[in-house]
Amino acid sequence: MSKISYMTPSGFEKLKKELDDLKTNGRQKAAKAIAEAREKGDLSENAEYDAAKDAQGMLEMKINQLEKSLANARVLDTAQMDNSVVTILSTVTIKNLKIGKSLTYQIVSEAEANLKEKKISSTSPIGQGLMGKAVGEIAKIKTPAGEMDFEVVSIEFI
């Protein structure tokens, strides 16, 4: 049984586009690579053929994973969500109490997490530590660098 994954409408569409691309362009490229390798002769000693087949297997595994993610996705409407506490899809500004630096992150599902876009997973240490906290509360979060204290400065949905 797979876990339900809560997503933004844009995150859901992004995964759908990636899946469509892999099913069309990705499969065409894999088939072409296999055909080219097959033309090079004896398949029992053909490393290119083995590599192409492995790449095809990895592609099919990725497609299967995306299909499962989309099948278990629940698209949430942020307009109907409560911003009194940090929940999935919250955009939260936190302040590191040790160094006084503020950071803003959106709490998202694992499938949408992307640190470059300032989207962190609700299952990450920081995401888990912030869930359920209200503005003004302190979240004690265990990180690889040790325990850190973050104050929740603001919560909103963007």
Image (tube, helix red, strand yellow):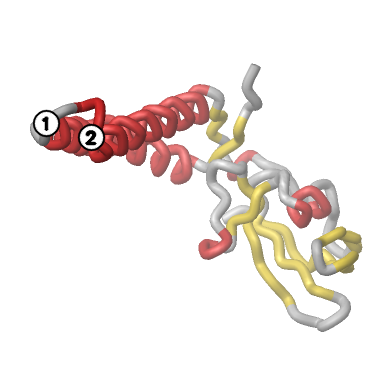
Q: Position of residue 113 (x, y in %)?
A: 57, 50
Left or right, 151 with reference to 118: right
- Residue under the point 84% across and 55% down: 134
Quadrant containing the N terminus is top right
- Residue under the point 52% across and 64% down: 116
Q: Position of residue 119 (x, y in %)?
A: 59, 56
- Residue topped by disc 2: 46
Q: Of residues 156 and 122, which is closer to you in this image?
A: 122
Amino acid at the residue labelled 1: Gly
**72 up-or-down from 126: above or below:** above
The residue at the far bottom in this view is 99
Q: Position of residue 25 (x, y in %)?
A: 21, 38
Q: Secondary structure at mark 2?
A: loop
Left or right, 34 with reference to 56: left
Q: Of residues 71 and 51, which is closer to you in this image?
A: 51
Amino acid at the residue labelled 2: Asn
Q: Could you tell me if residue 85 is visible in this image?
A: no
Which is nearer the N-term, disc 1 or disc 2?
1
Q: Could you tell me if residue 113 is visible in this image?
A: yes
Q: Position of residue 148 (x, y in %)?
A: 87, 68
Query: How many other residues sit within 10 Å of disc 1, few (<14), some (14-19) or many (≥20)?
Result: few
- Residue under the point 76% across and 56% down: 126
The residue at the far top in this view is 1
- Residue topped by disc 1: 41
